[in-house]
Amino acid sequence: MDKRTLVALLLWSLVLFAYLGMVVVADIDTLRQGGIPTQWFGVPLLATLIFAIPVYLTWFTLRRLVFRPARMLSRDVRALLESRSAEAEITLPTRHAMGSLPGNVGALAVALRASRREIRSAMASATAQINEQKTWLEVILQGLTEGVLVCNRNHQMLLYNQSAITILNEPERVGLGRPLFEVVSRAPVMHTLDRLEWRRCTRGETQADLSESFVCTNTDATRILQGRMALILDPRGETSAYLITLVDISTDVEAITHVDVIRRALTMELRSAVGSLRAAAETVDAHPQMTTEDRQRFQQMMCAEARQLSRRLEELAAIFRGHALGRWPMSDIFSADLISCVARRLEDDLPELRLVPVGQPLWVQGDSLSLVRVLECLLRELHVFSGADTFHVETLLGDRRIYLDLSWKGPVVPAKQLDQWLDMSCGEELEHRTVRDVMDRHGIELWSQQAGLPGEALLRLPLIVPKRPQFLPEGERLPPRPEFYDFGIMREHEGTPELADVLLEDLTFVVFDCEMTGLDPVGGDEIISIAGIRVVKGRVLSGETFERLINPGFPIPTASIRFHGITDDQVRDKPPITEVLPLFKAFVGDAVMVAHNAAFDMKFISMKETRCGISFPNPVLDTLLLSVMVEDEEEDHSLDALLERYGIQISGRHTALGDAVATAELLVRLIERLQSQGFKTFGEVMRSSNMAAQLRQREHTLSHQNGNGSAVGV
């Protein structure tokens, strides 16, 4: 029962009591004698009805033309005042009896929005230089091959670049405000930080001197990382944060291990074998009178030792090849880019020579400049030797190498000719190093042979395999993520407060949404899509998202496809929920989980926790209940209605990521309003939202009971 209906009932009650009062006053003597006044059904009743009808009509008119328009006007004014958005609109009533008040309120809203726009414009102008510097910083970070992390004293990430995500190989755990020790080993970092802090406190060193290198691993110990830490000091000289740069040295460590194997073999195994061989030879030489039988035994022993030594040397050469050479600075190169560079260098003085790429380009590893110069030299010589103008270039996957084949119509290059080419100079760019020098550094052994077609020959260069994966399924390729940083949370607080006392602006949220095969989790419906987006310090981080399709293990009902558009073909090759939900848990971390009508999504998730071997103890907020807190219960609190009211544009409605992004924008607006209404901490919001949930549940229960009662009465 709303307030207006209650007012109407009170008015009718007053009319009834007024009528009874009139009757009592009119014939009190009859009542004293125990009789019933005849006036009860006479003129007073008619007068009362005549009086009640205008009262009701007046109340109905006021409700229609004053109360309802005033409530709508008040709702929109509150939303405009409590939101920092300049675009919140005021819906002016078309039919009302409030005179010029709605028009004046609308004009005031227009003026307020204009003032807010002017303030935003002034702030944008004042921060233009800062934004330019920020752009420079982002370009620098993106261009670095080293991973860059900045952390506060609570070891939360404040800044990171794309290289850090690649090196750490855990994109779900890297993000603004996420714990550092979820991605790197704790002990080396803490030890280095303690050393630098001790130097700062005891020696008084400047910020330029407060840096130190260390070695650590990622959390699953699959990569060895060379790190360097530097302290960041505030104006008082206290440590406010620290910078870490990371380089993956796993390959270097492997190369050092192989070099150690070779060193041990040279200093121990081979020395012993050479010593035995030398002793046998000296014995034979020192005893010419030795019997034929003894001499044969010594010769057999020397032959066996020589064969063993030869085999061991071949093994060591195989280990050495490609590892010691890898100490020369090299990087991953796309073969198409390599061939394109060669073609551009040749087109000036050999315009008739054509390079035709064949097959799929592959990644190789090497020094790009030296490889380009070697290929240029070889193609010039091949052009003169064979007279061919067209050379086909193809890269092929080998067992341990990537083969780059140059093929042409003409004779095979003899080995003697190849050996002469190896002694050619590569020019001043490489300080007149020879082709052989470059080949040795890359572990390349040239050879020429007949090609597959008659009359064709090829020259093969076995190149080093790249560090990166050669192929990656398109669906799993990670998009570039921009760098985010917020130095506002660098101000650390004493101790670790309980979550209930944490301010709303200090919380990290993960807003999520799920798409399902149906609406009945108990009846067997499954999650087929889950997505989330992180919100930190009132900012929706569009680069820190999670989105996965899930194979439910059975056909998706046609009725549900109408809403989310996910078909059986789209999920056929996707992983099951047991693989996806742990990844989502890693993405969420300790953040507060947020959804619209969260209980529905959480029911599906909670029913899969045991099966997936994980749990989500995270606190959960519901934007539906937050909306009830800041607005009247009578308003429409559906997601579509709220997005329209707050002017939030949504791309991809009824997709998990699209709904999650829209809900995240809604969360930011609702938190602004909650803070304007005096809600400061997470505990205050949780207590009020729980109360709102209880009231809403009670109202739905009463409505259901009243509906059943009416049905029975009928």
Image (tube, helix red, strand yellow):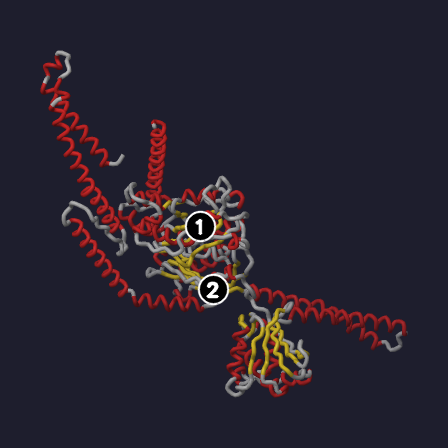
At 33% across and 68% down in the image, what residue appears? 132
Which sits in the foreground, 550 or 162?
550
The amino acid marked with disc number 1 is: Arg
At 23% across and 61% down in the image, what residue appears? 118
Tell me where residue 684 appears, x and y as whole percent: 32, 42
Which sits in the foreground, 711 or 10?
711
Compared to residue 48, the image places residue 170 above or below, namely below
- Is 7 positioned to the left or the right of 180 in the image? left
Quadrant the C terminus occupies: top left
Label 1: which residue?
Answer: 562
Residue 449's quadrant in the figure?
A: bottom right
At 77% across and 71% down in the image, what residue appears? 307
Tell me where residue 222 appears, x and y as whole percent: 56, 58
Q: What is the total number of numbered labels drawn onto the structure image?
A: 2
Graded by Cα atoms within 10 Å as few (under 14), some (14 to 19) or many (20 or more), the crowding at tag 1 reads few
Graded by Cα atoms within 10 Å as few (under 14), some (14 to 19) or many (20 or more), the crowding at tag 2 reads many
- Is 119 positioned to the left or the right of 183 in the image? left
Query: Closer to the observer: label 1 or label 2?
Result: 1
Compared to residue 151, the image places residue 626 above or below, namely above
Tag on residue 107? Answer: none
Distance from the alpha carbon under mark 1 to that under mark 2:
40 Å
Compared to residue 355, the image places residue 109 above or below, namely above
Kindly indicate whether the residue at mark 2 contacts the one at mark 1 (C-beta within 8 angstroms).
no
At 66% across and 85% down in the image, what residue appears? 417
Seen from this angle, which residue lies furthest top? 33
- Is 709 positioned to the left or the right of 435 in the image? left
N-terminal label among 1 and 2 = 2
Label 2: which residue?
Answer: 163
The amino acid marked with disc number 2 is: Ser
Tell me where residue 171 appears, x and y as whole percent: 48, 57
Tell me where residue 673 appears, x and y as whole percent: 28, 48
